[in-house]
Amino acid sequence: MNQNELTGFVISRKNINDADKILTLFTLEHGRYSLIAKGVRKPKAKLQSAVEPLVETKFRALAKGKLPTIVGAKALDKNMFFGTTIESNLSALLLTEVVDFFSVENLPNESAYFAYRAALQRLAQNNKTSLVLNYYLLNLLKAYGVEPHIKPGLTKYWLDYADGTVLDRAGNNSVLVDIDVVKLWHACLEKNSQLIEKLGVDKSTLVNSLNLLISYIQQQTERKIKSSKVLSESTNLLQAN
């Protein structure tokens, strides 16, 4: 039986049988990768703490049956989101859902992996949660090749949900985009995170940007981002400090 070593993050979990879980990982080596964690739901299971989301982990898996089985797991860092704000936690989970939507089985994507890892680090450390979330959400979309494609120099913009183009004319499935949102998107896609975090962006622009991007992703994937509703209803919605 072959044993594989994988580095990655848990992006979704599903309970099966009495004590097992099927885990979907986002790995550096294989992209999306599914396996089974046997007995992990038992009260004293050794692997319990190693199969949490938002923590980069080194996994060992044994090819056995329909799905490989976890035989070892070691977190490469502690969970950075203990003690952080609810906005930081929900923002990290939102990005995790996006990775779950777009990652492909056995197709590695280093750009997406490193963008996701950097996003978690910055969200856990930074008080400009909404700005960091917008930046990394756009750069994750860029890594998957589905980012908004902006034609610069226009005075009015529509985002076409079908193909992601941002043009000066409305289409059959498009929405008007505020010019300040377009400027933010262009900056996020062209500049590095350090420069973006120095920008002074008003709260309404950040909220409008996030809502548009979430709608766009849901149209692209025909799936609902569950964490976005909780995030939008937070009493401290996307604080722009």
Image (cartoon, rainbow, N blue to C red):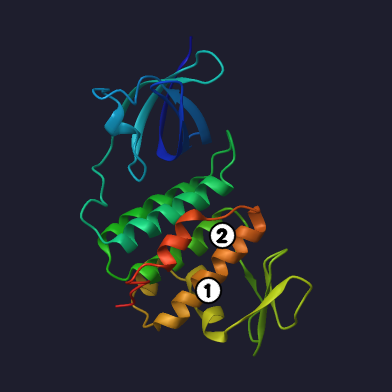
Q: Position of residue 41 (x, y in %)?
A: 34, 26
Q: Position of residue 114 (x, y in %)?
A: 43, 50
10 Å neighbourhood of mark 2: few (<14), some, or many (≥20)? some
Residue at the farthest bottom position: 155
Q: Is residue 128 above or below residue 62?
A: below
- Count of number-bearing discs: 2
Q: Quadrant of residue 53?
A: top left
For disc 2, the marked residue is 142
Q: Secondary structure at mark 2?
A: helix
**Residue at the (46%, 21%) spot, across then down:** 17
Residue 190 visible in the current orientation:
no
Residue 208 visible in the current orientation:
yes
Between 115 and 97, the one nearer to me in the picture: 97
10 Å neighbourhood of mark 1: few (<14), some, or many (≥20)? many
Q: Quadrant of the C terminus?
A: bottom left
Q: Secondary structure at mark 1?
A: helix
Mark identifier at residue 185: 1
Quick one: label 2 or label 1, which is nearer the N terminus?
2
Q: Quadrant of residue 201?
A: bottom left
Residue at the farthest top position: 1
**Residue at the (20%, 55%) spot, across then down:** 83
Q: Amino acid at mark 1?
A: Trp
Between 162 and 107, the one nearer to me in the picture: 162
Q: Is residue 92 above or below residue 32?
A: below
**Residue at the (36%, 20%) spot, across then down:** 39
Real-space Cα separation, disc 2 to disc 1, in angstroms:
11 Å
